[in-house]
Image (cartoon, helix red, strand yellow):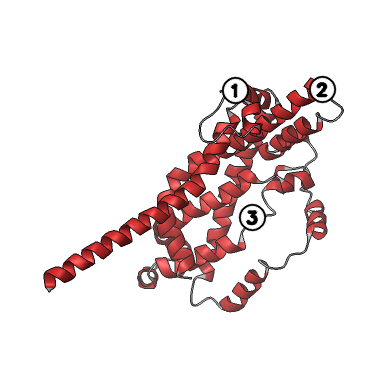
Amino acid sequence: MVNESKAVRSRDDRIFDALVYTIAGVVLLLVLYPLLFVVSASFSDPISVIDGKVWLLPQGFTFTPYLHVFENESIWSGFRNTILYTLIGTFINIVLTILAAYPLSQRDLPGRTALMFIITITMFFSGGLIPTYLLIKSLGMINTVWAMIIPGAISTYNLIVMRTFFQNGIPFELQESAWIDGASNFRLLLTIVIPLSMPIIAVMVLFYGVGHWNAYFNAMIYLKDRELFPLQLILREILILNQSDNMGLDGAGMTERVMMAESIKYSVIIVSSIPVLLLYPFVQKYFVQGVMIGSIKG
């Protein structure tokens, strides 16, 4: 009887494992195929893309769309600006989020519940675009680097996730023992909390970094000098210009423009996505530990 039950459990386990791997494989294909298609389409002959001949591998391999994108001199200044905005902005985001999340995670903070309630409200209500623009203008940040960094210095969601990590991921007894030994809150934060919080910090770096890298709306609103435009805004202009140039053309000229615009559309996606895809593997290992403790327990 024992051997039969073991055999039954073993067979059930194999069936369960096969089902899990099948579902995981289907999800992987659903997520991975669109990316592979965009990469293949960006290197393919536009006619093959329009005719639906591109499924997995490039058809009529060509670098022409990328040459059209990179021949625009503004794209290099866009790369420079976006890297600058991402590095400075992410650093400010992390510092301010830690400094706000740590005191909010302490049980003895007076009015902690009321403060969290007020902070959480900002996730659902805001002043609106016009009041925000007037505020940025009154602060003298229009057409400056700070207009791309300061308005979103702290994300409420990220603040809540980091605060929850501090509460659940770091034993309170460890902090209490440090206080007994005479450590101040600032020293405790620097020597104990931050070193033990590297998983959630890595996750926040990715969240904030991707947000800064993909940001373009603030640039449209607050920036006037083309030398300050981020990469996303430059790529948007390239895409729109190639589509608008088709207007007024006829015959072969218009057909060629339409096909090139189709290829440029995919190459622009790749150019804007590659840096983030290169960053992700370095912080992916922290996702389970950081997000699980920071959000699910919360």
Q: What's the mark number on residue 153?
A: 3
The reply, left or right, for residue 220 in relation to residue 199 is right
Q: Are marks 1 and 2 in contact (CB under 8 Å)?
A: no
Quadrant occupied by the N terminus: bottom left
Circles 2 and 3: CB distance less than 8 Å? Answer: no
Q: Secondary structure at mark 1?
A: loop
Q: Which residue is mark 2?
A: 251
Please say whether residue 203 is visible from this viewpoint.
yes
Q: Residue at x 44, y 59 (%)?
A: 290
Work out whether mark 3 precedes mark 1 in sequence or the reverse, and give the earlier one. 1
Q: CB under 8 Å between callouts 3 and 1? A: no
Query: How far from the left and from the top, in percent, is residue 57?
Result: 51, 31
Residue 263 against residue 135 in the figure, above or below: above
User: Which class describes the residues within 10 Å of circle 3: few (<14), some (14-19), or many (20+)?
Assistant: some
Can you give x and y, in whole percent of width and height, for residue 239 in the image?
72, 34
Between disc 1 and disc 2, the foreground one is 2
> What x and y, as percent, mark residue 197?
43, 58
Q: Earlier in the sequence, mark 1 or mark 2?
A: 1
Q: Name the spot of residue 280 as percent of width and height, x first.
A: 48, 45
Looking at the image, how many numbered discs can be counted on the residues? 3
Compared with 190, 141 (above or below) is above
Pointer 1 residue: 63
Query: Farthest residue toward the right?
Result: 248
- Foreground of the two, 245 or 225: 245
The one of 130 and 143 positioned closer to us in this rendering: 130
